[in-house]
Image: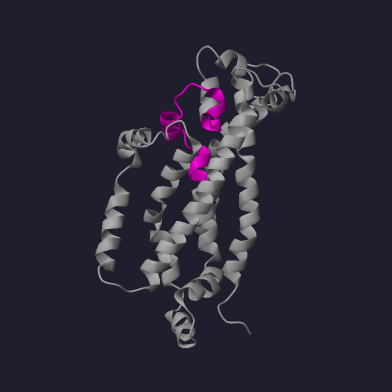
Amino acid sequence: MKKTIQAILRHVVLLLLAVVWLIPILWLFVTSFSGYKGINTSHFFPETWTLDNYAQLFLRADSIVQYNKWFMNTFVIAVFTCVISTILVLMVSYTMSKLRFPGRKSLMSFSIILNMFPGVLSMIAIYFILKTFNLTNSHIGMIIVYSAGAGLGFLICKGFMDTISVSLSEAARLEGASEAKIFFKIIIPLSKPIIVYTVISSFLIPWGDFVFAKLMLNSGIATDWTVAIGLFNMLSKSMIAKYFSVFCAGGVVISVPISILFLIMQKFYVEGITGGSVKG
């Protein structure tokens, strides 16, 4: 009886936490269909429903809303960052996990310590360095910065590769396989779960970033902005009364690529978990 009561209480607490977490998301979603453009706190659900907010995002660009441009800018930055960062993380993780060379442990310790410092502390320095090379207000400059420090995030991926049996690599070396062949033919197929994690996290960083994007893209040209900057601009005092529902619609749309990416990568994650290193 006591165990049953404890289980019920646990589930009730979890249900309350889920409701608290989901209510803001649900409110943002239903508000995106509201016929009232400003913030309406007197009703949770809109009094009038419309798709006009989504139509305004994609079909009626103006000086304030240029969502197509923002979305494409963010998507390009996120995709290139994701590809470059994933490659760097996997290469560094393999090197630290499977190779032995002088200074390896010292380099790992230094990298971990360096990675503990918040990236915000270096933003001003990064800005002036990029300004020297005329890369401010540049999407290429943002991709470089987002990708440059990706290799320092090797720790989780390395921990996963440490669980892959060393005997597989040793057997491949005895057969004459090069390190590149071992990496691509053995380690990568067995690392699908951590690759999925790396891809998603590498995509999410530039996709939802505001602080660094706002610092870099400061020319005032709206067509150069990312989605985060564009949506934030709608929340200014002079805009929020006319664009809040459009802001909510933009927030809903920005979650779609992440959901699609997760659904696509989930297949590889499950295959990596259920698959073995030995074929029967």
Q: Is residue 30 above or below residue 170?
A: above
Q: Position of residue 202 (x, y in %)?
A: 49, 49
Say left or right for 97 vs 13: left
Task: Measuring from the top left, give residue 32's x and y in whole percent.
Answer: 66, 26
Q: Quadrant of the C terminus?
A: bottom right
Magenta stretch contains residue 218: yes
The image position of residue 185, as x and y in percent, is: 55, 74
Up-down relation of residue 108 to residue 73 (above or below): below
In the depicted structure, whether residue 53 falls above or below residue 7: above
Residue 232 counted in the magenta span: no
- Main SS of residues in magenta: helix
Note whether residue 5 is visible. Answer: no
User: Which picture quadrant has residue 107?
Assistant: bottom left
Front residue of this view, candidates 223 and 42: 223
The image shows residue 115 at horizontal and vertical percentages of 32, 50
Q: Is residue 214 visible?
A: yes
Using the rendered view, name the quadrant where residue 124 is placed: top left
Magenta segment? 204-228
Q: Quadrant of residue 26?
A: top right
Which residue does the image show at 57% across and 26% down from the upper left? 223
Seen in the picture, residue 63 relative to 73 is either above or below; the reply is above
